[in-house]
Amino acid sequence: MTDKINPDHYKKAPLESIEYIEHQLGPNFKYYLVGQVMKYLHRWELKNDPINDLQKAQWYLERLIKVVDSENPF
């Protein structure tokens, strides 16, 4: 079964799209992740596959947690 959240075609370039965005945005990357979480939570009920959008929101939230955790000095 293919990964619907992070499919293989996202990984074909030398950098995944998410990694490219992270490099371009630097410390502002976390706000991009917040926006993605908000987007998927906003529209999940409007889609034919609401679980997929909730899983995408979860994926971005998990990535955000890792970024914030790496910035946290405690």
Image (cartoon, rainbow, N blue to C red):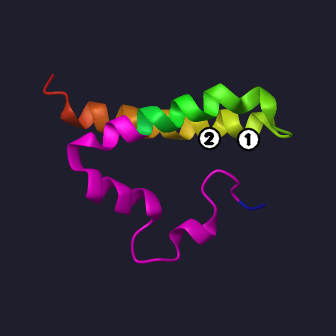
Q: Amino acid at mark 2?
A: Lys
Is residue 65 toward the left or the right of residue 6 in the image?
left
- Residue 58: % across, % down: 57, 34
Residue 19, quarter of the rendered image: bottom left
As drawn, 8 above or below 31: below
Q: Which mark is residue 6?
A: none
Q: Are marks 2 and 1 in contact (CB under 8 Å)?
A: yes
Q: Any magenta on residue 19?
A: yes
Residue of label 1: 52
- Residue 45: % across, % down: 78, 27
Residue placed furthest toward the left: 73
Q: Amino acid at mark 1?
A: Asn
Is residue 10 toward the left or the right of residue 2 in the image?
left
**Which residue is pictured at 26% across the width and 41% down the height?**
28
Is residue 24 toward the left or the right of residue 7 in the image?
left
- Residue 37: % across, % down: 52, 32
Residue 17, quarter of the rendered image: bottom left
Total labels: the figure holds 2
- Residue 14: % across, % down: 40, 77
Q: Any magenta on residue 63?
A: no
10 Å crowding of disc 2: few (<14), some (14-19), many (20+): many
Q: Main secondary structure of the magenta part?
A: helix
Residue 38, quarter of the rendered image: top right
As drawn, 49 above or below 43: below
Which quadrant is home to the N terminus?
Answer: bottom right
Q: Which residues are magenta?
A: 3-32
- Give the structural element (helix, strand or loop) at label 2: helix
**Which residue is pictured at 19% across the width and 28% down the height?**
72
Residue of label 2: 56
